[in-house]
Image (tube, rainbow, N blue to C red):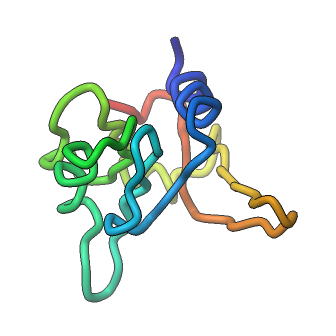
Amino acid sequence: MTITERLYQAYLSSHTVTTDSRAITPGCIFFAFRGEHFDGNAFAPQALEQGAALCVISDPQYKVDDRCIVVLEEAHHAGGGAVALAVSDNYGFVTFHSCWLCRGRFR
C-alpha cells in the first residue's frame, strides 16, 4: 500500500484530521507542523498514545513506529513530483496545509 493509500484509508475510517495534539480522537490523522514557537513533531508519540491512527511528521527522530509517516521538509522545496494535500470540512471550507507528499522522500 502506498503512503497516499494509507492516508486515504485512515481518513475513510475516521474522517478526522487534526494539527492540534490536544484534539486527538481515536483513529484520527495527526499532522505535526513546526512553528516559530513550537514543534508539533514532539507531540507525535503522545498523539499515538491517545489513539491517532497515523502521524505525519517532518523530523525522523520522532518516528515511533510505522504509524508515523516522515515527510522531509526539504521535499517541500524540491519541486517536481510534489502533491499538496487539502482537507475540506462539512461546510465546504478548505484548510490547505503545505504538507507535501513527494515520491521517494518518505522513510
Nearest the camera: 14 or 104? 14
Count of picture labels:
0
> Which residue: 33% across, 71% down?
34
* Coordinates of residue 19 in the picture (x, y in percent): 45, 64
* Vertical order, 60 against 74 (above or below): above
Question: Quadrant of the rendered structure where residue 67 is?
Answer: top left
- Is the C terminus in the top left, top right, bottom left or bottom right quadrant? top left
Q: Position of residue 99 (x, y in %)?
A: 54, 55
For this orientation, the residue located farthest to the right is 92
Q: Pick the residue in front: 5 or 73.
A: 5
Is 106 left, or right, of 59 in this rendering? right
Residue ID at (56%, 49%): 16
Q: Nearer the viewer, residue 33 or 101?
A: 33
Query: Percent from the top left, x then y, of residue 30?
Result: 41, 52
Residue that appears at 60% across and 64% down: 97
Measured from the top left, where is residue 106 in percent x and y?
Answer: 38, 32
Residue located farthest toward the bottom when viewing the structure as drawn? 37
Residue at x 35%, y 79% (from the top left corner): 35
Q: Looking at this rendering, what residue extends furthest in the top direction?
A: 1
Vertical order, 21 against 87 (above or below): below
